[in-house]
Amino acid sequence: MTRKIPGLTAALAVMFALTACGQNTASTPDSNASAPAETAAPAPAAAETSHSDAPHWSYEGEAGPEHWGELESEFATCETGKSQSPINIDHTKIVRSGEIKPIEPHYGKLTDATVINNGHTIQVNVTGEDNYVMLDGQKYTLLQFHFHHPSEHQIDGKNAEMELHFVHQNDKGEKAVVGVLINPGKANAVFADLWKHLPEKASEEAVPLASPIDLSVLLPQDLHSVHYDGSLTTPPCTEHVNWNVLEQPIELSQEQIDLFAKLFPDNHRPVQELGDRTLSEGE
Ligand SMILES: [Zn+2]
């Protein structure tokens, strides 16, 4: 899109806000309240059409991550923010403290969820308040979860094959994300059904899950996590997101990973500077 044509800019901005990147406010508030990938909102019709209502940000080229901050004024934080995500989790920099409690997920069976290909990822939107996580005594309700390929966070400089983001919000509207790295290994039975019905085309409409998903099975056994103060990893890259990246990865079969990769060959944002932030973990 030509975002610099005078006069058109505002109109385009409005249009995009209504299409590709702005659905944040819609049905499900999500982590990215204004950004699709981290967002629970039904995402925009994007990739189906390649002209003006295509997503106005992407993972490559002129609308790729290094340009997000220039695409829209609301995306400026993507470029100027000092607490951006993802990051490289460098184990030599982790501060260990007995005062940090493990995350306490309360995830159960999702019976009423919907799944959407929003042009940026495959996302499962969750309704109700039955699924939540306790982080340092605070309750954050699960809004949605979605996937990145390859992973966004790095562990000591290396990406995993994929990463799963559980996006939550507390009653003050603050976001918290639990990130789970995914490595090739055994097929995951929980994903099997979801994977069988991956929506191949971007759409504005989320469809009901073909069968219930037991979310608790999507977590590793060891819930030790590295915590830091970060941001949404999609525009508008809003900061003050409570990040918790689990140390233990889960597994998907290579075939399951390949199925996702066929739809999204690369939907990850590169790592950002840690700056003066602290990486912390319980003992
Ligand atoms: Zn994400």
Image: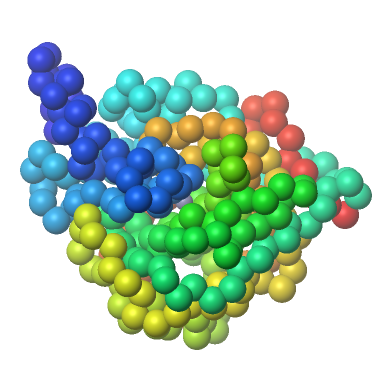
Answer yes or no: is residue 57 visible. no
Q: Position of residue 54 (x, y in %)?
A: 17, 44
Q: Residue at x 91, y 49 (%)?
A: 98
Q: Is residue 96 above or below residue 184?
A: above
Quadrant position of residue 179 = bottom right
Answer yes or no: is residue 283 visible. yes
Q: Which residue ends up furthest to the right in the rendered image?
A: 98
Number of residue marks: 0
The residue lying toward the viewer, choosing from 221 and 108, is 108
Quadrant position of residue 106 = bottom right
- Name the colour scheme: rainbow
Q: Residue at x 33, y 30 (%)?
A: 67
Q: Position of residue 232 (x, y in %)?
A: 49, 40
Left or right, 114 with respect to 101, comes to left
Left or right, 239 with respect to 73, comes to right
Q: Position of residue 209 (x, y in %)?
A: 36, 75
Q: Is residue 103 above or below residue 55?
A: below
